[in-house]
Amino acid sequence: MRRGPIRRVGVIGMGYVGIPAAVLFAHSPRLEHVYGFQRASASSGYKVGMLNRGESPLKGEEPDLEPLLASAVRSGHFEATSDFSKIALCDAVTLAIQTPFSDPKDLLPDFGPLFEGLSQVGRHLVPGMLVVLESTVTPGTTVGPARELLESESGLSAGVDFGLAHAPERVMVGRLVRNIREHDRVVGGIDAASTARAVELYQHVLTSGQVIPMTATAAEATKTAENTFRDLQIAAINQLALYCEAMGINVYDVRAGIDSLKGEGVTRAVLWPGAGVGGHCLTKDTYHLERGVRELGAGRLDFPPDLMSLYVSARRINDFMPRHMVHLLSDALAQVGTPLAGARIALLGWAFLGNSDDARNPPSEPFRDEVLAAGATVRVHDPFVRQYPGVPIEHDLDAVLGGADAIAVFAAHNAYRGLDPARVKALSGRDHPVIVDGRNVIDPDAFIGAGFAYRGIGRGDRNRHLLR
Ligand code: SAJ
């Protein structure tokens, strides 16, 4: 492998991971030039022009990104291009291409775009180059399919002619630049030389973050497991919320009690119960990890034979929460004598996260599907989400609340924390409207006092209240 220092870097995939990475590489004094590769596709080709004008195609606020991009373009250190032959000019190439569900129903990721990117790299691979996958992939992908594809396209041999590694991204929307600079960076090569080369590459962008070297497969397992563990923690508190409802107690009292346990070596990561877990990380990374152990660990896994994976159970509990919201809604509608069929539901908050416009895999969707199937009508309000395929998103809260038999809160948008019970009741026109709080944003007693039939996730202490 060419021993010279890395001077020219290519980043493939000008998305919310690739753009900040490319811009930060471009600002490294020891790097000469950075190419941002973007397919000239109908949906994303426009980004090349925008980026070369110093404009970020990313939605939402990203502190520092646009000034860094503009100065990298002005200095000539960064250029976006659809000409993938320029890969041959690079010493290192990273791939930051999303692997979303092809169909959320079958939980399988769509590796198509990533493998197309790898083919492009293979076609223009030259000896001495380092190739790094940043996308979240199933453990075993880097040493397996990715390596095979690169070798077959290039005729070169990984570990001998070129380096190959995995360095998972850990960026969060709204903090992209800061995350890349400050988060520790797990970096794993297919062999020691690849790992060392990848460590050299990421030193260019880290400020306070440290590089954590390991093998490629360990790096893939780290990324998927860190999200699996978060999903597990959320499932733990969601299950406790269901228990508290059944026992007639308030999960938030119990949560505060558990959280009060402090002190040396004491860890209780008690998260927050809610109407479900959405997004593009936690909904799929568990299944990456499960696939990895099934494929890589085939025949060698020692685990209780008749037991489902704890991690998959956690996914099932979190995916049950939107159904639990339907059960809470049905129970409250029965209390006010309104059948679910024909009921008019105001669904508040389509986004998967509070105060965000991100609506990937939203828990609100299975809820809406289920109540529509039961014959109810649904109007969706969200102040941030502009539109969503097949679902009309309304932005006038009073209009959506008008004439509603029931309100279901799915995202903790600030707009919902200030709902006034008397006003909401007047808008609904009902003597006893229903409100189901999936994110603990309203005060149960204020709404019960105004005549609402209230239900809340984990609020066993209020869910059996009498109508006022
Ligand atoms: N959620 C709960 N209860 C909680 C926390 C989250 O129900 O206590 C729900 C949210 O409503 C949402 C879903 O889980 O529907 C995911 O929330 P999230 O805060 O985990 O947001 P994500 O999906 O953007 O997760 C990302 C991940 N970061 C990366 O992949 C780099 C995750 O590893 C981070 O821990 C998380 O951001 C974060 O901490 O912000």
Image: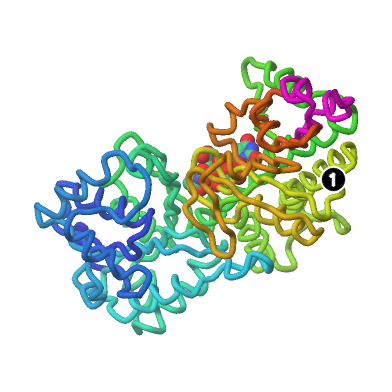
Residue at image mark 1:
330
In this picture, is 108 found above or below 270? Answer: below
Magenta span: 444-468
| Image position of 447 (left or right of 361) | right
Residue 222 position in % (x across, y down): 54, 50
Q: Please tell me which residue is depicted at 27% across the width and 78% down the height of the picture.
A: 124
Residue 230 visible somewhere in the drawing: no
| Image position of 67 (left or right of 187) | left
Residue 51 position in % (x across, y down): 23, 59
As shown in the figure, which amino acid type bears the numbered disc 1? Answer: Ser
Viewer-side residue, 118 vs 53: 53
Q: Quadrant of the N terminus?
A: bottom left
* Disc 1 crowd, CA 10 A, few/some/many (<14, 14-19, 20+): some
Q: Please tell me which residue is depicted at 72% across the width and 59% down the height of the picture.
A: 369
**Quadrant of residue 41 in the image?**
bottom left
The answer to whether residue 298 is magenta is: no
Residue 204 position in % (x across, y down): 25, 47
Viewer-side residue, 182 vs 450: 450
In this picture, is 177 found above or below 89? Answer: above
Q: How many marks?
A: 1
In this picture, is 403 found above or below 25? Answer: above
